[in-house]
Image (spheres, rainbow, N blue to C red):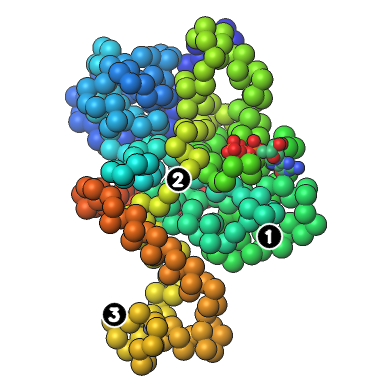
Amino acid sequence: MQGAEALTTYSLKSLGWTQHFVRQLDADTIATAKPVRLSAIHRTRLDGLSEDGPVSLNPSVLTSEYAVGDWVLADGHMASAPLERATEITRRAAGHEARPQLIAANVDTLAIVSSCNEDFNIARLERYLALAGMSGCLPLLVLTKADQVEDADDFAQRAQALSPALPVLVVNAKDPDEATKLAPWCSDGQTLALVGSSGVGKTTLQNHLTGTDEATRDIRDDDAKGRHTTTGRALRPTLHGGWLIDTPGMRELRLLEAEEGIEEVFSDILEIAAGCKFRDCAHESEPGCAVRAAIADGTLDPARLSRWRKLEAENRHNSETVAQSRARGKQLNKLYREGKARARLKRGED
Ligand SMILES: Nc1nc2c(ncn2[C@@H]2O[C@H](COP(=O)(O)OP(=O)(O)OP(=O)(O)O)[C@@H](O)[C@H]2O)c(=O)[nH]1
Ligand SMILES: [Zn+2]
């Protein structure tokens, strides 16, 4: 390794290769397979990283079937279809058709970034948690701009109340030492992605984690390709032995078929609703409504109920306008269950 980035090689493990992918190969393939992790998807070409360094491959299926973070097997310059993903982040595509659009694959942890000020919004955090649940990624909550408020811990406590198991970090993203609090989630071949509103500090955190600032990043891209571009940088190595995925779509994720994720985040309400007299109770004016009773006796926060309603309504709206939603939904549910199982396994190992 001569310092030139193009010569850098990685072991499969450090690229994020796990048993999940090994299991998909038969005995013959394992010996000869050339696994490649995709780092950028172009119109007719795929960039990837292999044990032997960066490669450029020709797709064997539509390029829209591939996502940054996918694993493929290379046969010469030909890429196989993507291996079955461990996790999959999709969003509702812009425009009338509203197809599900792949954002990224095999992201281990989805960091939900919010600042400790105007941006802090419990309903939005719940949306992102639902999204993480649906994608199969483990959620991590990062509260930035701790240096700009007096009561950062208060924000952390309110966020923690969403789920006791949720890791919550409070940082001043501009401080490199504080940014390294995210290192455990992007070390040892682990892949991290950041979501959150504009201006909350995602770029600042990513630059610290990858050891680049915008200026040097631009210069390096000029050097490598002879033109100014950051498209090759969708999958970037961190200083800690892991990966960051940052695609344009990652920044504006919307809910898609997130029902299961919503159910998980609002499981307390669903448990209460199980006690309603009518199975299809709308919790409006029906007799024997356990949800309204819980609000009346103070066990359920009415604001939380209305956030749940809003999210459900929005999700229904999104889902109805999505063509192919059923097939995709089934596939997502499967991934979601696998992700949950994997998450449990991981927690057990800690
Ligand atoms: N004081 C303080 N400033 C911060 C912090 N995090 C980010 N900023 C500043 O907020 C501004 C926006 O930060 P970015 O990292 O560009 O935010 P972003 O989330 O990448 O925004 P988009 O690129 O629009 O998605 C910059 O001026 C940062 O220096 C923080 O924790 N404390
Ligand atoms: Zn009810």
178 vs 14: above or below: below
Q: Is residue 208 visible?
A: yes
Name the residue carrying label 1.
Answer: 155
Q: Does 93 appear above or below 267?
A: above
Residue type at mark 2?
Answer: Leu
Q: Secondary structure at mark 2?
A: loop
Packing grade of label 1 (10 A; few <14, some 14-19, many >=20) is many
The answer to which of marks 3 and 2 sits earlier in the sequence is 2
Nearer-N-terminus badge (1/3)? 1
Residue 344 at least partly seen: no
Q: Position of residue 224 (x, y in %)?
A: 52, 9
Which residue carries the number 2 mark?
253
- In percent of the image, x 32 and y 18: which residue is there? 45
Mark 1 secondary-structure assignment = helix
Quadrant location of residue 34? top left
- Could you say where residue 307 lies in the image, as x and y percent from the top left? 49, 68
Viewer-nearest residue: 198 or 58: 198
Does mark 2's beta carbon lie closer than 8 Å to ligand 1? no
Q: CA distance from mark 3 to mark 2?
A: 31 Å
Q: Which of 181/14 is in front?
A: 181
Q: Label 3 neighbourhood size at 10 Å, few (<14), some (14-19), many (20+)? A: few
Residue labelled with disc 3: 280
Quadrant housing residue 75: top left
CA gap between label 2 and label 1 equals: 23 Å
Q: CA distance from mark 1 to mark 3?
A: 36 Å
- Image point (69%, 54%), residue name: 117
Please tell me which residue is depicted at 29% across the width and 30% down the height of the picture: 64
Q: Is residue 3 left or right of residue 57?
A: right
Give the quarter of the image for residue 72. top left
Of the image marks 2 and 1, the number of the one nearer the N terminus: 1
Tell me the amino acid under the disc marked 3.
Answer: Asp
